[in-house]
Amino acid sequence: MDILLIAGLWLDASAWDDVVPGLTALGHRPVPVALPGQGDGADSATLDDQVAAVLAAVDAAPGKPLVVGHSAASTLAWLAADARPEKVAGVALIGGFPAPDGRAYADFLPIEDGVLPFPGWAPFEGPDAADLDQEARDRFASAAIPVPEAVARGVVRLTDERRFDVPVLVVCPEFTPAQAEKWIATGESPELARATRLTYADIDSGHWPMTTRPRELARLLAEAAGA
């Protein structure tokens, strides 16, 4: 099965480099998706441009792919399920929950000079970054790509309620499945509260398991694709 891999804010498609070999070894075809504005120098990219790139990857898949979104890109994976509910085999959301209709894509950090820059590690101290040593932090920060404002502040539009019947796997890195279930049950993720086929998987990592637990993450995604 094709497994489409969508990285979160400040990351390009190379974020999945350590996950790809594991998925390939397990018999799948991993496809890291290049997002406009995150690695190609397109400072004028919009959220619609990123959605179009994801949908192009879905449409190019020979069968029904598993669409994987990390962090904020969980919303991009969910937008794919909304736009192509009959074409997407399932979505896997790593450390993130999809924004609801009418909400900005990533409206939680300051914009500077038309972009959303990596804010440094202060907002991520604690479970998010606990498994990243100083070398890994320095490498991440030096490679972080500012996200165009029109992506970060782009408004999410969801239109097809068939998305709620697409299977969803919530991969829980810096939080537990029990916490995720509680957040969803108490209304913190109105989209997932309506999902009819929702499962959870725990992974002992911080917010970036593709960096710190790539083989384990590959196994979880392969299992979801097999299911």
Image (cartoon, rainbow, N blue to C red):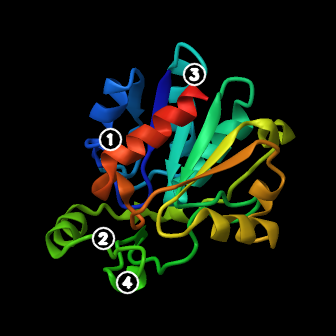
The residue shown at (74%, 60%) is 100
N-term-proximal mark, 3 vs 2: 3
The residue shown at (17%, 65%) is 139
Q: Closer to the camera: disc 4 or disc 2?
A: 2
Q: Residues within 10 Å of mark 1 (few under 14, many from 20)?
A: many
The answer to whether any part of residue 83 appears in the image is: yes
Cα–Cα span, label 1 and label 3: 23 Å
**Could you say where residue 158 lies in the image, as x and y percent from the top left?**
76, 48
N-term-proximal mark, 4 vs 2: 4
Viewer-side residue, 72 vs 112: 72
Residue marked by disc 3: 59
Residue marked by disc 4: 125
Residue marked by disc 2: 131
Q: Amino acid at mark 1?
A: Val
Cα–Cα span, label 4 and label 3: 39 Å
Give the vertical position of 88 relative to 157 (above or below): above
N-term-proximal mark, 4 vs 3: 3
**Residue 19: which numbered mark, if any?**
1
Q: Residues within 10 Å of mark 4 (few under 14, many from 20)?
A: few
Give the vertical position of 219 relative to 143 (above or below): above
Q: Amino acid at mark 2?
A: Asp
